[in-house]
Amino acid sequence: WTNGNTNKEKTLAIIKPDGLLGNHTDDIKKAILEYGFSILKEKTIQLDEDAVTRFYAEHSSKNFFSSLMKYMTSGPVVVMILEKENAIADWRALMGPTDASKAKSTHPHSIRAMCGLDIQRNCVHGSDSLTSAQREMSFFFRELSAVKLEDTWGMFGN
Ligand code: RTP
Ligand code: MG
């Protein structure tokens, strides 16, 4: 039998401050829906330094961290939970490579080619693994930590 949710995967997407400031939100959401994702949850928030430090903990010792902090707190962001089969990898494919200046020649139809500028101002974020997706979804949507077990159960096709 099936619970109707078999093989569906969820991932966390962020439209970063440059995406909102450049008015790319509607085009990005259009691309997301055309690619076959459902947008399960969405909210617009302003990140503070504490949130960025916790969210990007893995980058806290990198030389670009203070610049990343300034960028990510420079304006509101849109955080979304996307769902489809293979959502984590497919959303990263639709985003394109981290360096948006390269994306323009190598992945011209990607979102970063469409609205990103360079290696930092690349318009969007996507979780890079199942573990990150779970952590990042409950980071922004706390109520989800309560349904995590049920979701995991579905993901393994039981
Ligand atoms: P990926 O893991 O595929 O490289 O892509 P990502 O978007 O997850 O990028 P990541 O390396 O995890 O870095 C997180 C964000 O930090 C900014 N960044 N700046 N100045 C730089 O060299 C630099 N490198 C990364 C970007 O905004 C990046 O998305
Ligand atoms: Mg990353």
Image (cartoon, grey):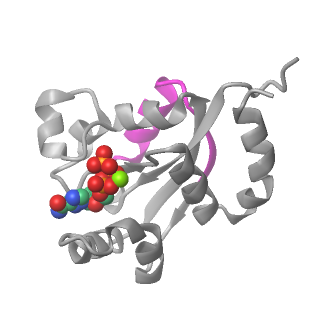
Percent position of residue 100, x then y: 19, 44
On whether residue 26 falls in the magenta region, the answer is yes
Residue 140 occupies which quadrant of the picture? Answer: bottom right
Q: Relative to 62, is 16 above or below?
A: above
- Asked if the magenta segment contains residue 64, the reply would be no
Quadrant of the image where one finds ligand 1 = bottom left
Pick whichever, 38 or 49, lies toward us.
49
The image quarter in which residue 95 lies = top left
Q: Which residues are magenta?
A: 24-42
Quadrant where the N terminus is found in the figure: top right
Count all numbered tags in the image, as a single digit. 0
Inspect this view and state whether residue 142 appears. yes
Classify residue 73 as left or right of residue 147. Answer: left
Indicate the position of residue 8 as horizontal and vertical percent values: 65, 29
* Left or right, 46 with reference to 93: right
In the rendering, at what x and y percent does residue 53 appear? 41, 77
Residue pictured at 23% horizontal, 70% vertical: 62
> Residue lying furthest top in this view?
1
Residue 147 in the image: above or below residue 154: below
